[in-house]
Amino acid sequence: MISCQGPANSFISSLLPVIFLMVTTVLPLIIPPSGTWKSILEFVGDPAILLLLAIGIATYTLGIRTGKSLKAVMDIYGEAVKDIAMILLIIAGAGALKEVFLDSGVSRDIANVLQTWPVHPLVLGWLIAAIIRICLGSATVAGLTTAGIILPLMTRSHVNPNLMVLSVGAGSLMFSHVNDGGFWLFKEYFNLSIKDTLRSWSIMESLVALIGLGGVLFLSLLLNNQERRNLYF
């Protein structure tokens, strides 16, 4: 029998949110839900509910079951909240700023202006995503906004959609800085200064974006050469 204080218990308890998320995602594909079952699954599948269930189970398996009192477990939670409170505050502020930009239409205005630039579609997709990312700080917003803007251009230019996805994904990682929640998360966890975070995290993200663009253009060149050979022969 596995000890309640063993590494397996710790490992499984820490992975509970991922396990729950996988189950609630895969289960509807196996058994299509309907009626009350569908409502229950949607409720349990909500990320906030999943985390609440996971922390409740972890409170028992890693706390009460190991002999700790409920007060001792709550004291541990209190100390943990103190350590991450500033990180959560900064991330929430960055998220609020992102929502202001998103709801005001700034991201779409930027993308519409960039769409008129006479550059290769793959480079344009990367550039739109990169500039929105730098302005708003959210890779998700940059990717989704660029996808909506670049779609009409793709249909006209017959660009390989797989390469465009890679290009937009690479551009959405460009130069994470002070308006990105991930920037502050990295800074606080590793106890770095803003300068050091810019020199490490931001440069690393920029290199990923630039190298990604280079890889996409190289793949595009290979595909074009292959298509020319097929036409020739």
Image: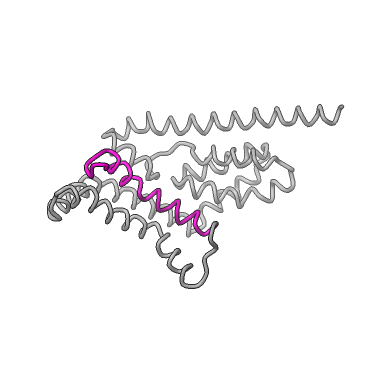
Image quarter hosting the N terminus: top left
Across and down, in percent, residue 202 comes to 41, 33
Q: Is residue 102 above or below residue 210?
A: below
Across and down, in percent, residue 25 comes to 48, 55
Across and down, in percent, residue 204 comes to 43, 30
Q: Nearer the viewer, residue 198 or 161?
A: 161
- Tell me which corner region of the image, top left, top right, bottom left or bottom right, holds residue 46: bottom left
Residue at position x 40%, y 53% in the image = 20
Residue at the far bottom: name it: 35
Q: Is residue 186 above or below residue 33?
A: above
Residue at position x 68%, y 37% in the image = 120
Across and down, in percent, residue 146 comes to 58, 48
26 on left or right of 53? right
- Magenta segment range? 1-29
113 on left or right of 89? right
Q: Is residue 211 above or below residue 110?
A: above
Residue at position x 51%, y 45% in the image = 132
Residue at the far front: name it: 1
1 on left or right of 140? left
221 on left or right of 98? right
Magenta-span inclusion, residue 45: no
